[in-house]
Image (tube, grey):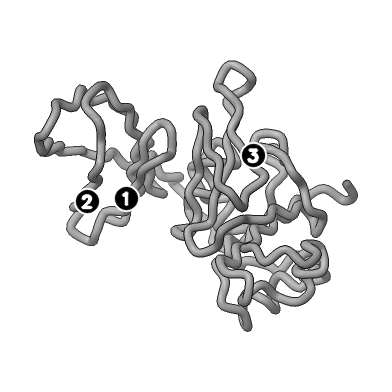
């Protein structure tokens, strides 16, 4: 069914196959919260009390969201602003992952951190420490606002650009979910397009480029 299953912390996640099967391993005993997301279906949240040294089988039933009686389908008209940034050219010519405006608008994600979990090469971590020798990013405790940060699975560090400008902040500080127009992710430093490398300097990192619908920042 290609649904996304993730823990509350975002530390572990999986995508179900066409038959709806998925496996997540490596949990410690105790209570763990889960979220299930799939476009066109109502989100589900549940908690499991996981025993030690065991395998737990869970059956999850998703319910479709109500459909409009009349649906008008229009083409995804290119954004002139995104075209000027080179977003569409890179989507056609570069080995990255891209969320177009239509995909962003149709996503059921309620926050930037949930939206960025769509990229399989990114680990989004919320509400607990996350430090690596190469990374300058960390996670604030949940009491300070639910801090989240992310790590590239293919690179030792990850630069975040907002409208082409590098930022050094947790995800909830970068921009609001409603302001995000499109996103692109280039996992390895040697695959980062030249026009995005200029904002990074000489640091060999992966890049997440968030493009907003704001006229100016």
Rounded to the nearest angstrom, the CA distance separating label 2 from label 3 is: 27 Å
Place residue 28 in its image quadrant.
top left
Residue 140: x and y, percent?
61, 27
Rounded to the nearest angstrom, the CA distance separating label 1 from label 3 is: 21 Å
Residue 161 lies left or right of residue 145; in this view the side is: right
Contact check, label 1 and label 3, Cβ < 8 Å: no
Q: Nearer the viewer, residue 63 or 2?
A: 2
Q: Which residue is mark 3?
A: 171
Residue 9: x and y, percent?
43, 33
Query: Which residue is at 56% across, 58% downward?
Result: 156
Dot placed on the residue nearer the N-terminal end, 2 or 3: 2
Dot placed on the residue nearer the N-terminal end, 2 or 1: 1
Query: Which residue is at 72% across, 43% downward?
Result: 179
- Disc number for residue 22: 2
State the residue lying farthest toward the bottom: 93
Instruction: Assess disc 2: are there few (<14), some (14-19) or many (≥20) residues with their C-alpha within 10 Å of its C-alpha.
Output: some
Residue 130 lies left or right of residue 205; in this view the side is: left
Contact check, label 2 and label 1, Cβ < 8 Å: yes
Q: Which residue is mark 1?
A: 14
Instruction: Assess disc 3: are there few (<14), some (14-19) or many (≥20) residues with their C-alpha within 10 Å of its C-alpha.
Output: many
């Amino acid at each position: 069914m290609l649904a996304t299953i993730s823990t509350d912390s975002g530390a572990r996640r999986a995508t179900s196959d066409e038959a709806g099967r998925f496996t997540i391993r490596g949990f410690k005993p105790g209570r763990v919260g889960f979220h299930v997301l799939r476009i066109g279906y109502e989100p589900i949240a549940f908690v499991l009390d996981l025993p030690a040294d065991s395998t737990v089988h869970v059956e999850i039933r998703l319910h479709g969201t109500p459909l409009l009686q009349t649906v008008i389908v229009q083409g995804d008209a290119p954004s002139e602003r995104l075209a000027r940034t080179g977003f569409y050219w890179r989507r056609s010519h570069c080995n990255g992952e891209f969320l177009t405006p239509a995909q962003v608008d149709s996503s059921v994600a309620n926050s930037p951190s949930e939206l960025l979990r769509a990229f399989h090469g990114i680990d989004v971590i919320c509400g607990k420490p996350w430090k690596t020798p190469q990374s300058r990013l960390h996670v604030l405790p949940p009491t300070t606002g639910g801090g989240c940060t992310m790590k590239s699975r293919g690179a030792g560090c990850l630069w975040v650009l907002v409208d082409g400008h590098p930022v050094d902040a947790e995800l909830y500080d970068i921009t609001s979910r409603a302001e995000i127009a499109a996103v692109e992710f280039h996992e390895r430093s040697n695959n980062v397009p030249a026009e995005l490398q200029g904002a990074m300097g000489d640091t060999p990192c992966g890049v997440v480029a968030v493009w907003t619908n704001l006229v100016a920042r």
